[in-house]
Amino acid sequence: MTTLRLAAFGWLVPGGAFLLMRRYLQFAVFAALVSIAFVSGILLQGGTAWPQSAELAGLDGFTALVFKASVFAKMLAGAPYLVAHTFDSSTFLASRLHEQGATLLIMAGAINVLAISSALDLRKRTEATR
């Protein structure tokens, strides 16, 4: 199992790297955490759309970069982001609850990255002991 394959499948399927390693409990925990955080973020109307230039008008370069980085962080959630982005027609700032929803979406991406790094570290440690 290559590192790239584990990382790619781990990104696409939340906790998927653990699934390929046959660590079913860790897979279930990370899949549940990412899914719950992502669904909660969508229910709180966190947007998955890329910010449009009209929404970034009047902002300095750093603030615009932070907005774009937040969308990238949401993308790290993998398949849930792809599904939500496919069916989402809202704008970047959809409602009054968008900040809480966006925070949960970013958390889902961060948890997924932690799952990938944890699985890769576990793989490295188990190969070192062989």
Image (spheres, grey):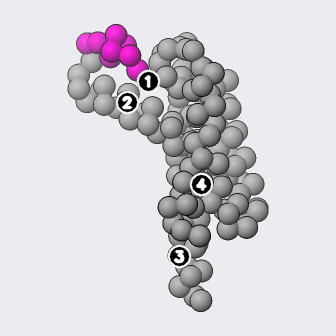
> What is the CA distance from the residue labelled 2 to the residue labelled 3?
33 Å
Q: Secondary structure at mark 4?
A: helix
* Placement of the C terminus among the 4 image quadrants: bottom right
Query: Mark 1 = which residue?
Result: 50
Query: Mark 2 = which residue?
Result: 68
- Let me know if residue 44 appears in the view: no
For the residues bearing labels 3 and 4, Cβ distance under 8 angstroms: no
At 46% from the left edge and 39% from the top edge, which residue is drawn? 73
Where does the image place residue 84, in percent across and percent down from the top left? 62, 28
Query: Mark 3 = which residue?
Result: 124
Pick whichever of labels 4 and 1 is earlier in the sequence.
4
Q: Secondary structure at mark 3?
A: helix
Where does the image place residue 64, in percent across and percent down from the top left? 31, 25
In the rendered image, the residue lying farthest to the left is: 60
Indicate whether residue 82 is drawn in magenta: no
Query: Mark 4 = which residue?
Result: 10
Per the rendering, the mark at residue 69 is none
Pick whichever of labels 2 and 3 is earlier in the sequence.
2
Q: Secondary structure at mark 2?
A: helix
For the residues bearing labels 2 and 3, Cβ distance under 8 angstroms: no
> What is the CA distance from the residue labelled 4 to the residue labelled 1?
23 Å
Pick whichever of labels 2 and 1 is earlier in the sequence.
1
For the residues bearing labels 3 and 1, Cβ distance under 8 angstroms: no
In the rendered image, the residue lying farthest to the bottom is: 130
Q: Which residues are magenta?
A: 51-58
Say left or right for 53 vs 87: left
At 67% from the left edge and 31% from the top edge, which residue is drawn? 40
Q: Is residue 84 above or below residue 108?
A: above
At 62% from the left edge and 40% from the top edge, which residue is drawn? 79
Q: Tell me if mark 3 has few (under 14), some (14-19) or many (20+) residues whose alpha carbon lies within 10 angstroms of its own.
A: few
Residue type marked 3: Lys
Q: Is residue 12 above or below residue 52?
A: below
